[in-house]
Amino acid sequence: MKKSILSLMGVFLSVFVFAQETSHDAFIVRNLDNNTERFSKVARQIWENPELGYLEFTSSKLLIDELKTAGFKVQTGLAGMPTSFVATYDKGGPVIGFLAEYDALPGLSQDAVPFRSVLVDGGNGHGCGHNLFGTAVVASAVALKEWIDANNIQATLKIFGTPAEEGGAGKVYMVREGLFKGVDAVINWHPSDRNAANASTCTAVMQGYFKFHGQTSHAAGAPQRGRSALDGVEAMNMMVNMMREHVDQESRIHYVITNGGLAANVVPDYAVVEYMVRHPDVTEVKDIWQRVIKAAEGAAMGTGTRVEVEVVAGIYGLLPNETLAKAMHKNLTLVGGVEYDQQETEFAKQIQASFNTPRVPPLSVAKQIQPYQLTHFPASTDVGDVSYVVPTVGLGTATWVPGTAAHTWQAVAADGMSIGYKGMMVAAKTMALTGKDLILSPLLIKEAKKEFDERLGDVVYEPLIGDMAPPLHFRKDQNKVK
């Protein structure tokens, strides 16, 4: 009899907890549904004014204004970056952080139409969806704050406005400044062509400019008096390209000549090449970067020029946390994917017709939730540095038409219309529900921290950037605004 009573009590308690959780979830999802139009407008405003890294003054202000209106206290200009911010809503309890990005890319200007249509010649565009990224985070945080108030819950929310993810690595400076101390877990997301909440690793990266200085002269009348800075760049590139045969196969080395001289009949005294070196192992990245520097020094010696190395970014790969990822996957499955209406379906079909690939995934992928797995992402993100100082989790949602690659005009087009906004709200709901779970479950935070410590092991995090200041000039020469 006693066992039966205890069993019944256990069933009752389980039903009560389930009902309570369902009620909390419904409050958050309903809040975000009711505010979809509001946050879609914010995302569109940022999309219409695409700002490059460290220059996101309008974009960051739009997000800051939303957070201030909602009752967050906001600090700006942190870690030496004028467009950074931290917005805090402090009600005690566990501290949950969110990462917001809002920088655009150069040369990706595009209208929100399913064919190539440049808005500004050489202009910027949100080809990585950061107009959606930052907005979804703010929407999620505001909904979570209102849920905290409505239920008199003890919790603290911190929204980190992080500039210059596309090359300037703004998060690294915020980590170095100690802004993530005391945070229990960090939540983020990224636009994608599908819905997945996987634990993921990615590549670490070093990035910088190699600036060669030579001597001008008349290229025909007195070539013997010139020392071509462009020769230095080309000699360096040749040596690095030969080096590719002798690095680990998971390495990635890419470059672009950003300044090669101004006139063919003038021996250029100044030339610049930008390099990025990637590998899953940060130690390997450091080693390859030093080899690239040696190639540059050898090129300068052989061409009678001088080379100056300017590092602009150095970031770690992601440290995965499966405890958090599985909790987030559960919430993504609950929220569901993106469903297209007839107009969006026609838009998506036209986008897919523009792909230069024989294999195009079905549009139904946007609606599906990908199975949970531990994955490796071959690109890089400065979220990696955050993940080495606090347990971090992220997801991707179908803001782009299935099959779309990031950093393309097709991505920009979807980021500025309803397909992008629908994916954005899937992300906002999933992040808010995951934040709710962390706030209500001290055990989840404890298990995430345990896994974090185990994966970190003996690694002592040290920023790859050393003591350098943020490269605020990084994108200034490339900036073309509408």
Image: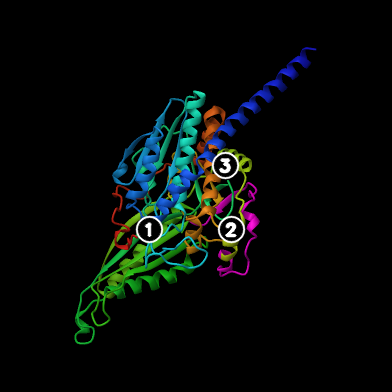
Residue 261: where, in percent of width, then height? 27, 74
Residue marked by disc 3? 325
Q: Residue at x 32, y 62 (%)?
A: 478
Residue 288: where, in percent of width, then height? 42, 60
Closer to viewer: mark 3 or mark 2 = 2
Report which quarter residue 479 is drawn in: bottom left
Closer to viewer: mark 1 or mark 3 = 3
Q: Nearer the viewer, residue 344 or 238?
A: 344
Magenta region? 351-379
Residue 120: where, in percent of width, then height? 37, 65
For badge 3, the amino acid type reads Ala
Classify mark 2: residues with Cα within 10 Å, few (<14), some (14-19) or many (20+): few
Residue marked by disc 1? 207
Q: Residue at x 34, y 49 (%)?
A: 58
Q: Nearer the viewer, residue 135 or 294?
A: 135
Residue 337 appearing in the image: yes
State how far apart marks 3 and 2 are (Cα).
Answer: 34 Å
Mark 1 secondary-structure assignment: strand
Q: Is residue 357 magenta?
A: yes
State how far apart marks 1 and 2 are (Cα).
Answer: 42 Å
Quarter the N terminus occupies? top right
Residue 173 appearing in the image: no
Q: Residue at x 58, y 46 (%)?
A: 197
Q: Disc 3 or 2, which lies upstream in sequence?
A: 3
State how far apart marks 1 and 3 are (Cα).
Answer: 29 Å
Residue marked by disc 2? 343
